[in-house]
Image: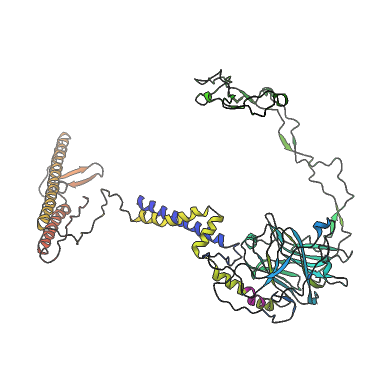
Amino acid sequence: ITKMHFQWDWLCLGVLIISSVTAGMENEENLDADVEVENFDKQSQDADVDREKSSIEVVYQTPKPTGEVYFAETFDEGMSRWVLSVTLKEDMDDNVAKYDGRWEVEELKENAVPGDKGLVLKSVAKYHAISAMLTKAFVFDDKPLIVQYEVNFQKGIDCGGAYIKLLSSSDDLNLEYFYDKTPYTIMFGPDKCGEDYKLHFIFRHKNPKTGEYDEKHAERPDVDLKKFYLDKKTHLYTLVLKPDDTFEILIDQTVVSKGSLLENMIPPVNPSKEVEDPTDKKPDDWDERPKIPDPNAVKPDDWDEDEPAKIEDLDAVKPEGWLDDEPQYVPDPNANKPKDWDEEMDGEWEAPQIPNPKCETAPGCGEWVRPMKNNPKYKGKWRAPMIDNPNYQGIWSPRKIPNPDYFEDLHPFKMTPVSAIGLELWSMTSDIYFDNFIICSEKEVADRWAADSWGLKKLVASANEPGMFSQLVTAAEEHPWLWVLYILTLALPVGLSVLFCWPGKKSDEYVDFKKPDVSKQITKRKLKEETEEFEDDELEEEKENEDNDEDERRETEEIKGELLKDTKKMGREAPISEDEGEYIYDDEEENEVPLEEENQVPDGSQEGDRLNKSDSEDEKKEADEGMGDRPLKSVRKRRVRKD
């Protein structure tokens, strides 16, 4: 039973390890429990294959919007409708403030769909600005706003952004002078610098009382965004703004963040009704201390503040072999004075110090000093214990007054209309790919647009993604600890097989009975020898049983004699007739037991011996009869544990 429990423990441990490996693998493939990410990473398995060509044939056609749109761009016909900025950033040196970053229209470097082109940011450490007018301005009234586009960080991203700006409508909007201070209504898209991974959704809200604009930032998505920025895959970013003042942010058509413009923006759209009074000041006698030293406490008489924290260990003994006369460091005998050493300028030259080689084999060198130990008498500076402050008044805060700047905007969705889209970026990484912009009011239109564009990229990347083994190796290169899990995963089935299939040690009480091997030929002589051995064992058992019976009879006679003597001493007779039978007393159970039954040998044991002998003779007979036509079976006597 103990062995069975031990094996079950190992089995449970194996299941736990496999579960942890599976969880680790799923953690590598999934960004979050609520977000599933398709793995479209392109890794060529053949160095001779041209990476710019897809492993499957995909017929690409420039997608056409199926409904009303405010803007749609595929870049398949170039970027003729886009305007490059020629202005400068403010408050910067002219050589640095130029928007001279280069843009190109080209296909993806990996998993490219033939004929599908996009806008690519090509320069490093330069400012880029490019914009285009919408087909018609979008007015925030009773229709949703849907903004969608694709981004691929083809070289990953160190520091830089890939967000877009929806520029506010105005009479003086000139795209050639588009720069960082150009008024915008919405900013949306990925941004990263250092280890800070962001997905911006910012809108500029107009204060109805002052007319000034304030930026309102959506709360950070509760999703790990790192994978989207570093996996070098094309991802689809979607923003949905609804007239009921709610919003949704999607990546690859999966919602990663959603909320309300009234409740999930930082700072809130509407200010608080009350604010702290700036003229209110804390009274001088206001006590904010929750605990104070006990004024009635007295330092104990035996409290010595002068005792040091450490004292010499007087029980310490200098180790034998300590070299008192040898210094710990000696001049390097192999050092030579540099040839250009000028003693007048550099002073007298001294060889550098090295550890004394004689100290390496000794317990120590130099003057021996007793080690220090903690002083048991040390108590430190006495301080009175702390007690609750009876005059505690709590933490003071200024009184509240009505907010003079309070306003309430119940529909922040009604923002400033937009009439242009722009990218104003700075990046330390080049080859950031943008494609398939669309601005519309119907989700079905955006989904169909994505199916005809991003869906093809997804299909090609899926066909080109490496096999399972290559993915495991790649994951282990990024996270070396995965090698341990791989080894455990491979070794665990082998270990469990050996544990459960390897024969265990035989015990005296429980014997694993081996089946006869019918493939081996047994001669009649061998069978006879085995049978004789079995008969000898049987005779020995019978002899042991007879000896046991004889001992039992002798013990019974002795007990009987003692009982008769006791009866005579007590002046009573205890005749034993044949009809009544002979009885002895069992001291433990206090019951009369017939003597004949006490001396009688258990019938079961004799019957078992006769059955064993009969079985042995039958097996021998069957073996003799079967020797002519078929291989003889090895007859192995089953030893029965004596009850």
- 62, 542: nearer the viewer: 62
Side (left or right) of 110 relative to 414:
left
- 467, 255: nearer the viewer: 467
At x 76%, y 39%, the residue is 389
Q: How is the image coloured?
A: rainbow
User: The magenta stretch spans which residues?
Assistant: 449-454
Residue 112 inside the magenta-drawn segment: no
Q: Say if residue 205 shows up in the picture.
A: yes
Residue 2 on image: x %, y %:
36, 50
Residue 519 on image: x %, y %:
19, 62
Residue 168 in the image: above or below residue 588? below
Residue 452 inside the magenta-drawn segment: yes
Residue 305 in the image: above or below residue 233? above
At x 64%, y 77%, the residue is 452
Residue 443 in the image: above or below residue 331? below
Residue 162 in the image: above or below residue 381? below
Q: Where, by quadrant of the figure, is residue 37 drawn? A: bottom right
Tally the marks: 0
- 149, 16: nearer the viewer: 149
Q: Where, by quadrant of the figure, is residue 252 drawn? A: bottom right
Side (left or right) of 510 relative to 374:
left
- Residue found at the very far top of the displayed protein: 325
- 206, 162: nearer the viewer: 162
Q: Say if residue 23 shows up in the picture.
A: no
Residue 521 on image: x %, y %:
15, 60
Side (left or right) of 99 relative to 631:
right
* Main secondary structure along the magenta-highlighted residues: helix
